[in-house]
Amino acid sequence: MEPRTLFDKIWDSHVVKSVGGGPDVLYIDRHYIHEVTSPQAFDGLRKLG
């Protein structure tokens, strides 16, 4: 078995669907908030319901 990086292990544990030749769909279990852009992003989500 070939050694895997921490990045590879985390990535693989979050893949929901892998489309051959396309992007992977990932499960995101944590959102990091940035003090400058987060208010606008959350306001947009709030407006969309």
Image: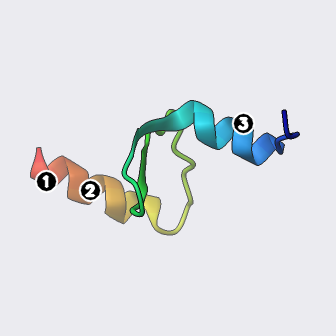
Find disc 3 in the rendering and name its residue. Answer: 9
Q: Secondary structure at mark 1?
A: helix
Q: How far across and down, in percent of the image, does residue 41 sit? A: 34, 60
Is residue 25 visible in the rendered image? The answer is yes
Q: Residues within 10 Å of mark 2 (few under 14, many from 20)?
A: few
Instruction: Name the residue at the bottom extreme.
Output: 36
Q: Residue at x 13, y 53 (%)?
A: 47
Q: Which residue bears the numbered disc 1?
A: 47
Q: Residue furthest right?
A: 3
Closer to the camera, 39 or 17? 17
- Residue at x 62%, y 43% (from the top left corner): 11
CA gap, disc 2 to disc 1? 6 Å
Closest to the observer, 37 or 27: 27
Q: Position of residue 14 (x, y in %)?
A: 53, 35
What's the CA distance linking mark 3 and mark 1?
Answer: 36 Å
- On screen, 21 above or below 4? below
Residue at 11% x, 52% y: name it: 48
**Amino acid identity at mark 2:** Asp
Find numbered disc 3 in the image and state the secondary structure of the residue it sits on: helix
Residues under labels 3 and 2: Cα distance? 34 Å
Q: As displayed, is residue 9 above or below residue 19?
A: above
Residue 21: assigned label? none
Inspect the image, locate mark 3, and give the three-letter code of the amino acid beneath it: Lys
Position above or below: 22 against 47 = below
